[in-house]
């Protein structure tokens, strides 16, 4: 019975082909440092899941953002846990992605034929930092508000285009409801979409070229 | 085109694959263990460390010291130190824009910058050494980010040294190291991988040692760490915080129970008619948002001053106004049931013969009934009551206000309804509090406290309390 069910599905979906292409791949002898990439992916997914839960209660407006988070922390069942995981997950993700980048640099895995994988990876590192920067404002507390004031100010010091960048980031000359709204949109729509696309390309390239081996004396 | 070297790399990889493993289950197993470890770590952090509490954002509060997220601190510190460089430091955008963009560009196009085909560390010592210096510099910049880049003129030598060492640690050492590494191939053609390794090792080691020195020096000679104010978390804590704020900012006109209809004894508002803010008329018709606005903007037509920080530099932050509104709702609005913790007595009741202490008994009374006027900027004969020392020693009549064991201390006389007259018989100090009287248990506590020599802590008070001799 199960066999027939499985065969029926396999005929339509092609499990076996997928298994061969995705899982049954030969790899060089691995080491624990090579787990950092998949760890980053797990953290990204975890941030996505907890983030989706948070948006069910979070309100991106200066009048209600802070109170909606207080509500999540105090009144929503396990809201404190979901927010806690999202908060610490952000910190951990920046760390893990950065160390992953260092690992790839040290083992020189960015060289032929994996140059594009590296460039996409740097894009993912920058997007992760962007996630951190935009997400930090959302609780709309003193710390996050003033951190964003300085952060955007620094971007505004660029010669010629500084004024434009500052206004584009803030949605005006000052931090306001517009800033919060656009940081929220970037945090939950733009960057996750960008990152999903980049992760897809990153994974495709990894499967295509295989995981690199740890360099030996003759490499 | 010559594809030989590509061929070689691919063959080399095939060779590694043959003595390798399979993605499933070998790699996936390790990945799963690490992922599981991270998830457990996150659950532990979320449960036992939690998310720090912060007050609501207040654009009017410009005194707040802004700081970016921890992973941007290194950049923040770099900018601060860069600003110290004479001449060059003034060109801000070099550090804020050019350096970060250059770093991102170098990182992004690294495969086209480091073009050698060698992968083993002995054959790419210089790039590895450069990266090591940069990463260690980022770590040490992050670690010393909290320390200001300028010390006051009269700071102790240790503090000044901690400040002076910062640019050396964060800019000079990595700068010299990078220059050395970049010119090394030009000046010393046959250098082995050991020379860059030594440069990186000495540079990183000295940066870390100096960072530790800076942190220790600043910890020992720098200013004492600022006390972080506790942010109320639970509803009860918020209501109590609101009550304390109400007792300072509102009580003069509205009275401690909010039922005042005619203002008495407030300069400029004497005899003004106001609506009792504890009444249903007010509480049922004004919602929380309007109440917040009234407190923040004031009621110019009825004489109420604005209390929001954006209109009043000594005013209240957004969070503080929220707490006052919570206090009014839960204490006066009959549709709300306050949590049990809020209804505790102001101070633990005193047993017969027990001596009260400032910290346990007196401070809550003073905070609730006296501080509103006895704080800086009010008409109070300079008698301030915000700390233990001030209660005992401040004011124009400091020698007579609170005298240990003296029942004629001004404090005790005035709270018991006796005015203090000067030589000509004019009223020098009226009864306290100016409107209404303290509850008998509060008066009793203050009398016992003064008569027993004003103990500060509960331990001191316990020592003064006579142990009752057990009756046979």
Image: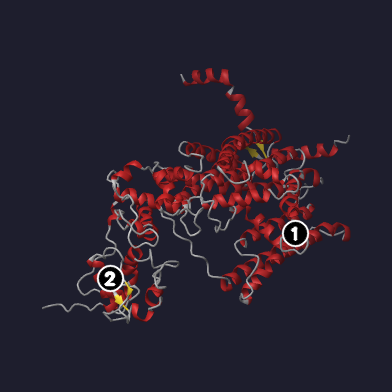
Query: Where does residue B48 sit, x and y in percent of width and height?
Result: 44, 53
Would you name the residue on which mark 2 appears? B415
Q: Taking the image as drawn, is residue B45 in sight?
A: yes
Where B328 sits versus A168, above or below? Answer: below
Query: Where does residue B262 sit, x and y in percent of width and height?
Result: 31, 55
Q: Residues within 10 Å of mark 1 (few under 14, many from 20)?
A: few
Q: Is residue A80 left or right of residue B428?
A: right
Dot 2 lies on which element?
helix
Q: Quadrant of residue A206?
A: top right
Q: Which mark is residue B90?
A: 1
Determine the residue located farthest toward the left in the rendered image.
B472
Where B447 sits versus B104, above or below? Answer: below
Give the chain of mark 2. Answer: B
Most foreground residue, B242 or A187: B242
Dot 1 lies on which element?
helix
Q: Who's the residue at 62% across and 72% down the image?
A: B159
Q: Quadrant of residue B199?
A: bottom right
Where B335 sits versus B180, above or below? Answer: above
In this rendering, the label closer to the viewer, 1 or 2: 2
The answer to whether the residues at label 1 and label 2 have Cβ atoms under 8 Å apart is no
Q: Who's the residue at 70% across and 43% down the image?
A: A164
Most foreground residue, B265 or B120: B265
Query: Where does residue B459 sit, x and y in percent of width and height?
Result: 32, 74
Q: Is residue B187 left or right of residue B79?
A: right
Most foreground residue, B243 or A158: B243
Q: Is residue B19 left or right of residue B250?
A: right
Q: Residues within 10 Å of mark 2 (few under 14, many from 20)?
A: many
Q: Who's the residue at 34% across and 73% down the image?
A: B457
């Amino acid at each position: 019975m199960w066999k027939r069910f499985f065969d029926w599905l396999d005929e339509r979906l092609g499990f076996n082909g997928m298994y061969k292409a995705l899982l049954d791949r030969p790899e060089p002898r691995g080491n624990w440092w090579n787990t950092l990439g998949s760890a980053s992916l797990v953290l990204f997914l975890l941030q996505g899941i907890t983030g989706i839960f948070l948006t069910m209660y979070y309100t991106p407006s200066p009048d209600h953002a802070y109170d909606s988070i207080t509500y999540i922390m105090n009144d929503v069942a396990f809201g404190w846990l979901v927010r806690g995981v999202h908060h610490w997950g952000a910190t951990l993700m920046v760390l893990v992605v950065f160390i992953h980048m260092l690992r790839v640099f040290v083992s020189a895995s960015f060289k032929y034929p994996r140059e594009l994988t590296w460039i996409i990876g740097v894009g993912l590192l920058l997007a992760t930092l962007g996630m951190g920067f935009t997400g930090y404002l959302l609780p709309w507390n003193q710390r996050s508000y003033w951190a964003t004031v300085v952060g955007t100010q620094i971007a505004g010091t660029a010669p010629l285009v500084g004024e434009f960048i500052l206004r584009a980031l803030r949605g005006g000359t000052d931090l306001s409801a517009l800033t919060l709204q656009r940081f929220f949109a970037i945090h939950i729509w733009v960057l996750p979409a960008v990152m999903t696309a980049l992760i897809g390309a990153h994974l495709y390239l990894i499967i295509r070229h295989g995981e690199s081996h740890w360099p030996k004396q003759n490499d | 085109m010559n594809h030989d070297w590509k061929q070689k790399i691919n063959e080399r990889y095939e060779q590694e694959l043959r003595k390798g493993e399979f993605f499933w289950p070998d790699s996936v197993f390790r990945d799963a263990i690490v992922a599981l470890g991270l998830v457990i770590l996150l659950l532990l952090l979320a449960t036992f460390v939690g998310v720090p509490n912060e007050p609501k954002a207040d654009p009017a509060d410009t005194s707040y010291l802004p700081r970016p997220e921890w992973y941007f601190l290194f950049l923040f510190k770099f900018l601060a130190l860069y600003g110290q460089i004479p001449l060059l430091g003034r060109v801000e955008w070099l550090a804020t824009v050019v350096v970060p963009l250059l770093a991102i560009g170098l990182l992004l196009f690294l495969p086209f910058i480091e073009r050698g085909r060698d992968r083993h560390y002995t054959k790419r010592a210089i790039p590895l050494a450069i990266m090591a210096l940069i990463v260690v510099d980022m770590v040490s910049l992050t670690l010393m980010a909290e320390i200001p880049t300028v010390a006051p003129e009269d700071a102790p030598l240790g503090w000044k040294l901690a400040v002076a060492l910062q640019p050396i640690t964060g800019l000079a050492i990595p700068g010299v190291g990078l220059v050395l590494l970049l010119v090394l191939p030009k000046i010393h053609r046959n250098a082995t991988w050991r020379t860059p390794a030594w440069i990186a090792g000495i540079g990183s080691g000295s940066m870390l040692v100096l960072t530790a020195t800076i942190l220790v020096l600043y910890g020992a000679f720098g200013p004492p760490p600022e006390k972080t104010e506790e942010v109320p978390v639970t509803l009860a804590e918020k209501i109590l915080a609101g009550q304390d704020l109400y007792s300072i900012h509102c009580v003069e006109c509205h009275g401690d129970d909010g039922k005042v209809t005619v203002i008495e004894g407030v300069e400029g508002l004497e005899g003004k008619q106001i609506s009792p803010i504890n009444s249903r008329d007010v509480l049922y018709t004004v919602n929380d948002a309007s109440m917040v606005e009234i407190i923040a903007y004031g009621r110019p037509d009825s004489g109420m001053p604005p209390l929001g920080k954006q209109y009043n530099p000594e005013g209240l932050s957004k969070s503080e106004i929220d707490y006052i509104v919570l206090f009014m709702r839960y204490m006066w609005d009959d549709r709300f049931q306050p949590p049990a913790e809020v209804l505790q007595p102001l101070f633990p009741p005193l047993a017969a013969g027990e001596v009260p202490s400032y910290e346990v008994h007196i401070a809550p009374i003073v905070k609730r009934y006296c501080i509103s006027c006895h704080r800086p900027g009010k008409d109070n004969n300079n008698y301030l009551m915000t700390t233990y020392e001030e209660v005992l020693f401040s004011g124009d009549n400091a020698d007579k206000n609170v005298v240990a064991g003296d029942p004629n201390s001004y404090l005790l006389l005035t709270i018991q309804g006796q005015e203090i007259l000067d030589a000509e018989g004019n009223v020098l100090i009226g009864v306290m509090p100016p409107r209404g009287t303290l509850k008998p248990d509060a008066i009793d506590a203050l009398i016992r406290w003064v008569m027993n020599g004003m103990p500060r802590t509960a331990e001191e008070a316990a020592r003064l309390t006579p142990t009752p001799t057990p009756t046979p």
